[in-house]
Amino acid sequence: MKTINCGELSFELRESNRRRTVEITIEPDGQLILATPPKVPLDKLEKIINQRRFWIYSKLLQKESIKQPPTEPQTYLPGQGFYYLGRSYRLKLVDTAQTPLRLYQGRFELSRQHQQQGRELFINWYRSHILQHLESITPSLISRIGKQPKSIQIRELGNRWGSCSSKNDIYFHWRVALLPHGMIEYVVVHEMVHLVQPLHNQDFWDKVERILPDWEERKEWLAKNGAVFTL
């Protein structure tokens, strides 16, 4: 793994023949990534970093100031939008329902008497539906990667979208259910490649690129927009 230091800022350098521009992204844990075409002169990289220094510090400061979501029950109101597989669906409160929460005719329907349990009901709904979705798309990847996960589980993972354990269990955050399909695919490929390469080294990213040639664009999109997809 290559790194580049510019003052007190340290970046992981990721070069790709497919890339035509220099892009700076910030991981959920605050790690700085500098994605570039090959052999960009160091002075040019430093110039780009200095031009975006204010933006970098602003984003790092935002990450430091992120607060935990409130623990008290939220009020889920009619017309609010809730994502599923990248699409936003409006909420409708209903007085009679066979189930407390369902996606029906283009709307989420929430039983009015369960309104104060809205967050818990949505999380449980996302958990069950994304597990089914993931289990439907992983078989085609198993043959390409050459290894099968011991299990696929849905959990609360904080700032991480997914995780692969040393015992080959793969965990996905329930928030993955909110993402567009292309981003879900990237998260799944990322974690499944960890079955054969635990480290984020060049071999890891080469394996990801063989499956998803545009992985960098997907990763950058997720880094920039992922925070939107939550409750």
Image: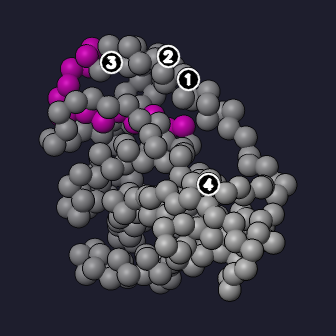
Q: How are the colours assigned in the image? A: one colour
From the viewer's perspective, tell me whether residue 47 is left or right of residue 104. left
Residue appearing at x 53%, y 75% in the figure: 104
Secondary structure under tag 1 reads helix
The span picked out in magenta is 30-44
Please state which amino acid type lies under the numbered disc 2.
Phe
Label 1, label 3: how far apart the Cα atoms are: 16 Å
Quadrant hosting residue 103: bottom right
Q: Is there CB contact under 8 Å for labels 4 and 3?
A: no
Residue at x 57%, y 79% (from the top left corner):
128
Q: Earlier in the sequence, mark 2 or mark 4?
A: 2
Query: What residue is at 61 percent from the left and 35 percent from the top?
Result: 63
Q: Which residue is mark 1?
A: 58
Choose the circle earlier in sequence order: 2 or 3. Answer: 3
C-alpha distance separating marks 4 and 3? 43 Å
The residues tagged by marks 1 and 2 sit, at their Cα atoms, a distance apart of 6 Å
The secondary element bearing badge 2 is classed as helix
**How far apart are the two marked residues, 2 and 3, measured between alpha carbons?**
12 Å
Contact? badges 2 and 3 (CB < 8 Å):
no
Residue 61 in the image: state x and y as whole percent.
62, 27
Q: Residue at x 63, y 64 (%)?
A: 92
Residue 169, percent across and down?
Answer: 51, 77
User: Marks 2 and 4: which is nearer the front?
Assistant: 4
Amino acid at dot 3:
Ile
Indicate yes or no whether the magenta region holds residue 49: no
Marks 4 and 1, Cα distance to the nearest angstrom? 32 Å
> Residue 148, position in %: x, y?
38, 82
Q: Which numbered dot is residue 48? A: 3
Q: Split into 4 quadrants, where in the image is the C terminus?
A: bottom right
Three-letter amino acid code at the position of disc 4: Gly
